Amino acid sequence: MNLFSPQIVMFLGAILVPLFKGRAKKVLLVAIPFVALATSHLWEYFLPEVVDRIYLPGTFLMSDRLPAPVFFLAFMIGAVGALMFALKVDDDLQHCAALVYIGAALGVITAKSIFEFYVFWEIMAVSSTFLVLAKRTKIASDAAFRYIIMHLFGGLCLLAGLILCSSDASPIGCLVGSEMQAYSLNMSDPGPWLIFIGIAVNLGIPPFHTWIKDAYPEATETGSVFLCIFTTKSAVFALACFFAGAKILIFLGAVMAIFPILFAVLENDIRRVLAYSLINQVGFMIVGIGIGTALSLSGATAHAFCHIIYKSLLFMATGSVIYMTGKSKFTDLGGLYKTMPLTCLFCIIGAASISAFPLFSGFVSKSMIVSAAGHEKYAWVWFILQIASAGGVVVHGIKIPYFIFFGKDSGIRASDPPRNMVFAMGLFAALCVLIGIFPASLYKLLPKLIYYNPYSPAHIVEMLQILGFGILAFVILKRLNAYPVDSRGITLDFDWFYIKGGRLLHKVADSALNSINAVSSRVIGDGAVSLFEKAFKSSQTTLLLIFVAPYYLIKGDNENQLKEVKHKLTETFEAGGVPIGIGAAVAVGFMVFCIFLSR
């Protein structure tokens, strides 16, 4: 990793942000991604004389299947827009977590070895958790806990798979300097399957999708914008590096594209609908990766690029509504087009893009994947993707803008959000339109030279039929008063199995650990066990103070406050409130097990 690599710039920015205040902090936040972009030499990728456009200078790209420069550019555009949208937020925790999160995502797609890839993968998981915690509510705290547990499980599976797939006997030495390679999902080989599970968690492939609709709605209005950009798209890139052409992905992607539609129809929470629609759109990308042809992989790349922009725009628009009204349920909103005209316009543009209306960005990217399925004679996949497209029109194309800005007037008269939020939405809305009108500007970024015309008469007529069918279905449901928008409960899908299975696991684990504790007490004595616990708690307190003390020194607080923090931390550990040791023990045990298997 270079000293001035883009990810290092982001990490340094996260350190500097708390030291600045007021206008200087805002300037710094906007400047950081541009400095990172300057250090990447990304411009060399677009020079006409560069023949090999796969490699970004100064980095090792993991695969020529999906180009890191295209993802890098998309991430930087997303970072600029999201940071600008968050300028009004006066919360260093959110700003620092967002910058570390962005840097980690950039590290994933530009890693020089799979060791770096894994490290950045885990940093991405931890830093993004703070964007959920930053809301500082009990519900958000619980969602963040479930979020990090899910991602730590995925990270351990990924690491175990990388170790098992290494040819080197040393589990650590095998990672340093090892390059990314493609694997086949052979049922007799557990290594690739563990890698696949680790990536599937970040992708939200069922049954690992629940964290998306659980955590994203509980993040802050600005935090959800960052969350929708990086985790799933980094996983799309990694999936193509490892498993492009794996036919099982076609089936899994088709399932992902179709099943969220039903749950999104039932949802009353705005951002839960967007979370389900995110799963739906990632399903299209996974189908493209599974087909594995030049057209489908280019389509997956293009769709990921467009998705970052229009999904961010939708999260910005809905986040602006929540920010200005304090309401996040469709049943509490309506009629806002009168006082929030710009936000309404931008939301409609985002909805048109995600629905693949002609002249909008989603139309020129999604159609590549659908066409690839048709060209490769996957008739059933083509049919499912068409149904998913029509259902998507009903859900995220019409439901979101209609029930928020039109529909029954709620009587709320909130104005458009602050100028920085409006500017960020305007930037992304303009990109949605420009890419839709000039698709060649996007296609030129793709690594494989392909000819594709999305505006063929046949395809335009086909898409207009799908859009018309979706609009007709929505109108009929509304006329019959059959659209279930007034659901005020929480819709469970696979969560039900987690709840039941979690309770069973807790009972089994509690019984087993109590048995081990009883045996340990008889063998080595209660005194020795108590002494070990005190020593361990003391070491935990010391380690946390190493990180807590600099914060108070920067803030200029006195020594008494530091003593008070130490006292509170000690009380917390004595009460058993922070079981860090249990997680560490499980992780170490899991690693030992993997090392044993790799020999």
Image (spheres, grey):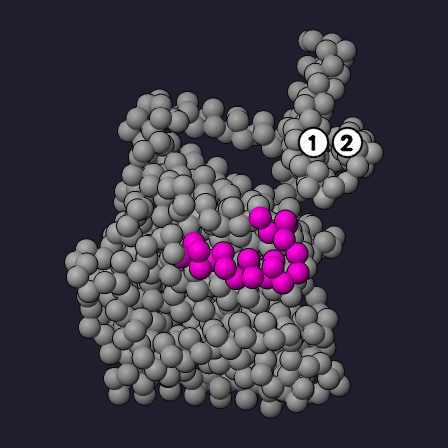
Badge 1 amino acid: Leu
Q: Is residue 76 left or right of residue 83?
A: left
Q: How many marks?
A: 2
Label 1 sits on a secondary structure element that is: helix
Label 2 sits on a secondary structure element that is: helix
In the picture of the structure, the residue carrying the numbered disc 1 is 545
Residue at 49 percent of width and 56 percent of height: 32
Residue 486, above or below 20: below
| Front residue (pair 408, 438) | 438
| Front residue (pair 269, 341) | 341
The part of the chain drawn in magenta is 16-37
Q: Residue furthest front?
A: 24
Badge 2 amino acid: Lys
Residue at 31 percent of width and 46 percent of height: 59
Q: Which mark is residue 566?
A: 2
- Residue 491 forms part of the magenta stretch: no
| Front residue (pair 480, 127) | 127
What percent of the width, then of the height, locates residue 373? 28, 68
Decide: few, some or many residues near mark 1? Use Cα within 10 Å; few <14, some 14-19, many ≥20: some
What percent of the width, then of the height, locates residue 296? 27, 64
Snapshot quadrant of residue 421: bottom right
The prevailing secondary structure element of the residues shown in magenta is: helix
